[in-house]
Amino acid sequence: MEIYRAHVLCCSGTDCTASGSTQIFERFEQLIKEKGLEKEVKVISTGCFGLCKDGPIVVVYPDGTCYSHVKPEDVDEIVSEHLAKGRPVQRLIRNKETEQEAAGKTLEDNEFYRHQKRIALRNCGIIDPENIDEYLAMDGYKALEKALTKMTREEVIDEVLRSGLRGRGGGGFPTGLKWKFTYNSQADQKYVACNADEGDPGAFMDRSVLEGDPHSVLEAMAIAGYAIGASEGYIYVRAEYPIAVKRLEIAIAQAHDYGLLGKNIFGTGFDFDIKIRLGAGAFVCGEETALMRSIEGKRGEPIPRPPFPAVKGLFAKPTMLNNVETYANVAQIILKGADWFSAMGTERSKGTKVFALGGKINNTGLVEVPMGTPLRTIVYDIGGGIPNGKKFKAVQTGGPSGGCLPTELLDTPVDYDNLVEAGSMMGSGGMIIMDEDNCMVDIARFFLEFTVDESCGKCTPCRVGTRRMLEILNRIVEGKGTMEDLDKLEELAAGIKSTALCGLGQSAPNPVLSTLKYFRNEYVAHIVDHVCPAHHCRALLQYIIETSKCRGCTACMKVCPAGAIEGEVRKPHYIDPSKCIKCGACMETCVFKAIQRK
Amino acid sequence: MPDTNEKFELLNQAIEELKDQPGALMPVMQRAQNIFGCVSLDVQKLIAEKLGVTLSEVYGVATFYSQFKLKPAGKYTISVCLGTACYVKGSQKVLDRLSEELNIPVGDTTDDGLFTLQATRCLGACGLAPVMTVNDEVYGGLTPDDIPGILEKYRELEM
C-alpha cells in the first residue's frame, strides 16, 4: 500500500456537492499533479462531516486542519502554502475567533465535535465511500468474518440482544428481539431488508451514512442474513437520494468482486446477496408493512399486524427490517462486544444517536451523541445556540410523528423513553429548533398538513380524522376558532391515536397534542384575543403607522399592492385595515421604521 | 431524442430484462417513466399486458406514488401566483389570459410539450404583484397584455 505524507479529505455529501465540492476536488487533483506532489499527497472524496452549514469542507491530515466555506480559487493557496510549505491557511480555518486560537483548530478541537461520539458515522468524512479498500482498512468486513467463522448464529443474535441496541428509525424496538423472532420463524426463504426511505422532513442521517459509508450497511445486512438464516436482502431507498443510490450500487459491485457478497462467503458456505429498490415518493412507505408492499411492486399501503413481518413479511416470507442507522452500529457491536456498546447511553437506551440539527440554530448539520445527552448540550454547546440574539422557544423532535418541547424541558436527557414521556418521540432523529418568531399553532398546522397530504387513505381515522383536525387548526390560525375547538382537537386526537391502522396515523396527532400541552396559551391567544403572539399568523396581524415617526414620504403608499394606504405628502399616512392584505411590503419599504406589526 | 417507436422498443427491452424478478412492476414503471417522461395510458396498457397484471393494478400504482406522472410536464412550467396580494392585483386575469393564449385549462400541458400551466400559492413576492414564474425566472407587475410577448420569447428560443 502506498504511504502518503498528507491526505486531503474533500466532503462529497449532498450539501457540499451542491455548493461546489466537486470542482474543489478536481482542482486539488490537478494542482497536486502540476506541482509533482502526487506521490506525497493523496486527495480523497469522502462522505459527510456533519458541518453542512459551513460547506464545502476540506480537512487536511495528519494535522487535522479543518477548512470551511472553501472555494475552488482557495485551493491554490492551500496547496502552495499548507501542502507544499506546511503552513495552514489561517483565513479559511473554521471558527477562527482570533489568529492565535485558529492555529490549534483541528477537527477534534472543534466545539462541534467535542461532545460527540461517532459510531454510526465512524467512517463518514474519513474514508472514500467509493473505494472498498479504505473501508477494509478501517476494520471493514472483519465483523462479518468474525460472525461467520467464530460465532454461531445464536451467539450473533445474543450479542446484538445484549448490546441493548434499539431501532433507530423511530419506534425504538429492541433490534436483537427482531432478529430472534425472525430466526425462530421456519421457512424455505427469509429476507433481510433495510429501510432507507428516510421521509421525515428535516432528517438526513441515513442519507449521510449511505453516502459516506455504504459498506457498513452491507456488512451488517450480511451479518443479519447469517443470523436469521436469509440469503437475500433488499435495500429500499428513496429515489430522491441519487448520490446514495449510486454509492450503494458501487459498493455492492465491489463487495461482489471481493467475494464479500455472493456465494460461499469466506469459504463458509454462506450465500448472501443484496438488491436495491427505489421508492417513488410516498412518505407512508417508511412504515414497515407499506415498505414491503412497495418492494413487491404494489401500492404502498400498510396492512394490519399481526401477522408481524418476522412471521409473514416480504413476499409472504419471514422478513427482518432495520433502518440504515441501526445497521451502521451492528459491525462495531460484533467486533467490540455487547458490553462495550451497552456501557454507553442510559439505562434503557444504549449507544449513540445521530441527530440532524436544523431550523433556528447556528450550526445546522449532523451530530452523533451518546444517548442521555441533555437537549441543552445539543442545542447550545454543539449547535452553537440561536442565531440573531433571538430567544429559544421549542425543539421539535420526531418529525410529523413527534412533538415540540419547551425551554423547561431543555435539561431532559435525550433517550427513547424520556422523549415519549415528554409527549414527543425519537423518530428518525430530526431536531428542528424554533425561536420566538415561530408560532406553535402554525407549526402544528404545518405538520398536520404534511400528514394529510401523505396519508395513504386506507383507514378512516387517518384519512378523515387528520383532515378534520387540520380544518380546525386552519380556523384557529385565521382567528375563527372557539375554545370548544380545543376540546374537539383533543377528542379527535385520542380517537386517531387508538384506531389508526399504522404508525403514521397513530402518531399524526402528536404535534398538536404536544403544542396543546406546552403552548396552550398560544392557542388561547389566537382564539380569545385574536392575536398571534409570535406575529406570524397573517390573518391576525395588524399593520399600523406611528404618526409621530411618519414623514409622509409616500414610499409605502407606492409599494402597497392593495391600495390600502392613504395620506398626503409630508403628512402622516394611515393604513385602512379593511383593505390591508398584510403582505408587509410597506414595513420593508419604510426607512423611518414608522410601521409596526402587531 | 428517440422517437415513439424507439421508446417502446426500449421499454420492451426493459420489461424483458426485469420481468422475472419478484415485484417487477415498480422497477419497470420507473424505467418507463425515464424513457417517456411519464407513464401514459398506452404505456400502462403495454406494461399490464407484458407483466400479466391487470391495468387497474398498474393504474393503482401509477396514481399512488407522487413520482409517477400520467402526462409529461412541458419544457417550461408557468406558475401564476394566486396568493392574496397577487389576486387583488388581478392575477386571475393573467391566468385566464394564459389559459386562453395557450388554449389549455390550468394544470394541463400544451400539445407541443412546451408549456405547462399551473396556479400556485403565495410565492412571497407580494411587492411585485401580480407575479408568475416560468421555470426559475420571475415576472412581476404583470398585466394580461404582457402575456403574448412573454410566451413569444420562449417560443422564439425553440426556433
Image (cartoon, grey):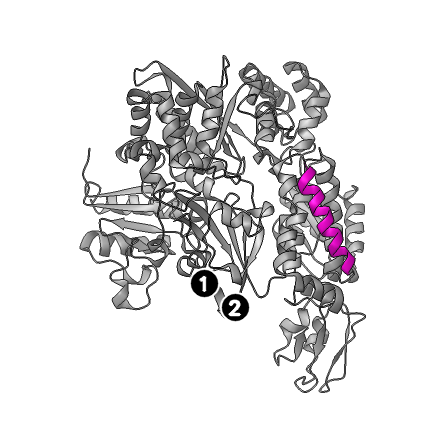
Where is residue A430 shown, x and y percent of the image? 51, 48
Q: Is residue A458 magenta?
A: no
Quadrant where the N terminus of chain A sits is top left
Q: Nearer the viewer, residue A510 or A99?
A: A510
Res. A481 in view: no
Q: Is residue A524 left or right of residue A24?
A: right
A492 inside magenta stretch: yes
Look at 21% across and 58% down and name the residue there.
A87
Label 1 environment density (alpha carbons within 10 Å; few <14, some 14–19, many ≥20): many
Image coordinates for residue B72, horizontal then vertical, percent: 67, 34
As rendered, which of A146 and A433 lies closer to the eye? A146
Q: Is residue B92 left or right of residue A382?
A: right
Q: Amino acid at mark 2?
A: Lys
Label annotation for residue A385 = 1
Query: What's the amino acid at mark 1?
Result: Gly
Residue drawn 60% across the image and 17% down it: B12
On the same chain: label 2 and label 1? yes
The secondary structure that dominates the magenta segment is helix
**Which element is circle 1 on?**
loop
How packed mark 2 is, by other alpha carbons closer than 10 Å (few <14, some 14-19, many 20 or more), is few
Answer whether residue A515 is visible to the viewer in this image: yes
Please give the range of residues in magenta: A483-500
Task: Quadrant for the C terminus of chain A, please.
Answer: bottom right
At a point 71% along the width and 34% down the height, the residue shown is A459
Is residue A179 or residue A443 the one in the foreground? Answer: A179
Q: Secondary structure at mark 2?
A: loop
Residue A495, quarter of picture: top right
Estimate the x, y position of residue B99 in percent, counting from the top left.
78, 46
Residue B54 horizontal/vertical position (percent): 71, 18
Q: Is residue A142 above or below residue A76?
A: above
Residue underneath mark 2 = A390
Mark 2 / mark 1, whichever is N-terminal: 1
